[in-house]
Amino acid sequence: MNDPVHVLQVALPVPLPQLFDYRPPPGSGSAMPSDVGRRVQVPFGPRMLVGVVAGVGPSTNAPAALREATGWLDAAPVLFGELDASLRWLARYTHAPLGEVLATALPAALRRGEPLPATHAWAWRLTGAGAAGLADLKPDARPRRFAALLEAGPRDEDALDLLLERWRPAARTLAGRGLVERIAVAASQLAPQPHPGPIPNDEQQIAIDAVAACNGFASLLLDGVTGSGKTEVYLQAIARCLAQGRQALVLVPEIGLTPQTLARFRARLGVPVHALHSGLSDAERARVWAAALRGEARVVVGTRSAVFLPLPQAGLIVVDEEHDGSYKQQDGIRYHARDFALVRGKALDVPVVLGSATPSLESLQNAISGRHLHLRLSRRAGDARPPAVRVLDVRKRPLEAGLSPELLAAIDQALRDGGQVLVFRNRRGYAPVLLCHDCGWSAHCPRCSTPERGHPMTAHAVGRRLQCHHCGHRAPAPPACPDCASLGLQPQGVGTERIEALLAERFGDVPVLRIDKGSTRRRDALEDLFAELGSRPGILVGTQMLAKGHDLSNLTLVCVVGVDEGLFSADFRAGEKLAQLLIQVAGRAGRAQRPGLVLLQTHHPEHPLLLTLVRGGYHAFAAGELEQRQAAGFPPFAPMALLRAESPHAEPPMAFLRAARRVLQPLSGRTAEGAPTLTIDGPVAAPMPRRAGVYRAQLLLSADHRGRLHAALDAALAAIHTLPEARRARWSLDVDPLDL
Ligand code: ADP
Ligand code: ZN
Ligand code: ZN
């Protein structure tokens, strides 16, 4: 008998849970174990796809019947070692096809089959003529100052950005005269030129020492109030990691990655800092990935998907604001970057630091159970004092654009004292509803929610335009009521635009800036706004985009309005999210010498969540919430998975989920106490039952422990995939769903 011929087992970005066999590309001999991790182009049906070789082995089909791969895209593997192993773990955990997981992890350019890009940093150095002619340059002029910076040796462009403003024209002038030249250097060859930071206080020092004491993997929860100097702890830990010649990865939430953050990291660490975020082009993202793979990127600060960077010389992973919801990917492969960072830290055998002023209940519970080392920073760093928080009862008070007279007086006072004011309202637009005062008609989105009861369209532009914040549908506001022809259409409720309009009218002599998705689409727009404001008295009005980001040292008053809706939401995580948001927004006040005040305006001053938060702070709230979660059998005490289905027609999602339920039901056993090991709730309509014209339903699974949940899914999914009902609905599985 012949030896079985070995073929390539290729992971392809298709929603099918298997690998696909191909013969190696023409002229490349037989499949070798060293091919694993190389990208390869293959025919798939009528299409060409880019896949990754996930294994080589004997073919299950007759090799002659197999198609041949078209060609190699890499000479050597791009996915290997720890990253490859961790991604295979992720595929098992999310119960997703390996090919789709690998495609999610690779940057788009590599996914399309483009070659791994070249990576280097640019630096400038003096030429021989430049070194000799330095003294002839006009003293104090920018070209002279630029040339002087290069006297000690080449400097990279990142470092130059920090050392001399507008150095580029000077560099061009000198280059034109042959005095300086631009050279490509490997980032790893640049010697760090760190700048010292403040001297750590006792609590910071304990945290820094705890990270330094880690020998291999450990998870640490750095639980520190806003402004307590968590970033300083990260910076010290990263500096130590760099000194050992290792790479550091810092994950930040989408809105946390500001130019200010990057500049602080660059200046302090003294090495080029690579940024990875959604604002980059595909080519730039691929360059950062390649630089990480080659070990050239020493420090990467990035948002969610940066958790997929190769880190061959890893020394440390930091997850800042670990509670932030933007770490969870909400479509495709539904991974949680914080949780995957922990998995990678373990596989890489390096410490993982999770930082937050408002840790997620998951992480707090892990700290309580001893899985994470719990490090506390209880005071603000430097001279800053914590802000005073007061609840303003506005029942029966006259409101203008939702603001009470007391609040307006406080704003007036803060401005007169030369301070800045932040008014937080987590609803953009002019008003959440456009209502007919005569017959009760209101504007609803034609594409969202159930046909009987639409989802209200938000009024924008003083009620002239309508927009659905769920599907983006836009329409001009009708001139008269479509039902009764009345002209009495009135915007109801208050959004940021309406507050902005009132404040601009009231406090016309100071700038009033609105910050929300509508006003600041570009990442830099926000920075420009802050730069324009400077430290002058002024008012910022905005949504949760204001909760994080640029430090405003002159911000003395924070007003929180219209959070009452959040107090009565059905989602079991709503309380946690609201508490986090309130603490984060409040934390923006009084960051510097001036004391801060937070005013929380509400119709429910006796609500337990508000009372607990104001009296006991976040941890008092969290302790009570954890007790309730445990009693109710919710995460973090019981793992969950959510099966979602959607279709342009009403019936198929429910039919599919009912069929899935029939597959899952028999898999539930009984615990010793007689409770089911697997609880199945539903199917029910999704919280937004129709969005953008698509009907949505869901089935919730929870189990008494994680292993049991995964075993049930493993046992059921193959059958669920082949259900006849599965062909009529689009469905997906979300393990550890954030939004139910
Ligand atoms: P966090 O990340 O917890 O919000 P930061 O690290 O940004 O806090 O620190 C808040 C402010 O306090 C920053 O301006 C920082 O420079 C300053 N700071 C941090 N640690 C110290 C310290 N030990 N001494 C003086 N100032 C400090
Ligand atoms: Zn009407
Ligand atoms: Zn809509």
Image (cartoon, rainbow, N blue to C red):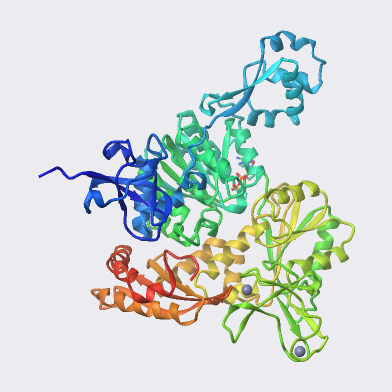
- Residue 621 to residue 254: above or below: below
Q: Foreground: 600 or 306? A: 306
Tell me which residue sits at (69%, 49%) in the image. 591
Q: Foreground: 8 or 528? A: 8
Q: Residue furthest left?
A: 1
Residue 62's x, y, as percent?
21, 52
Instruction: Evaluate whether residue 373 shows in this view.
Output: no
- Horizontal relation, residue 480 to residue 718: left or right: right
- Residue 149 to residue 165: above or below: above
Q: Quadrant of the N terminus?
A: top left
Quadrant of picture, ligand 1: top right
Q: Foreground: 578 or 277? A: 277
- Residue 540 to residue 289: above or below: below
Residue 470's x, y, as percent?
61, 70
Residue 597: which quarter of the image?
A: bottom right
Residue 13: which quarter of the image?
A: bottom left
- Residue 451 to residue 264: above or below: below
- Horizontal relation, residue 663 to residue 183: left or right: left
Q: Residue furthest top?
A: 132
Tell me which residue sits at (73%, 23%) in the image. 171
Tell me which residue sits at (28%, 36%) in the image. 29
Q: Foreground: 16 or 358? A: 16
Residue 391's x, y, as percent?
69, 69
Instruction: Evaluate whether residue 322 shows in this view.
Output: yes
- Horizontal relation, residue 448 to residue 458: left or right: left
Tell me which residue sits at (72%, 73%) in the image. 475
Residue 367's x, y, as percent?
42, 55
Q: How many marks?
A: 0
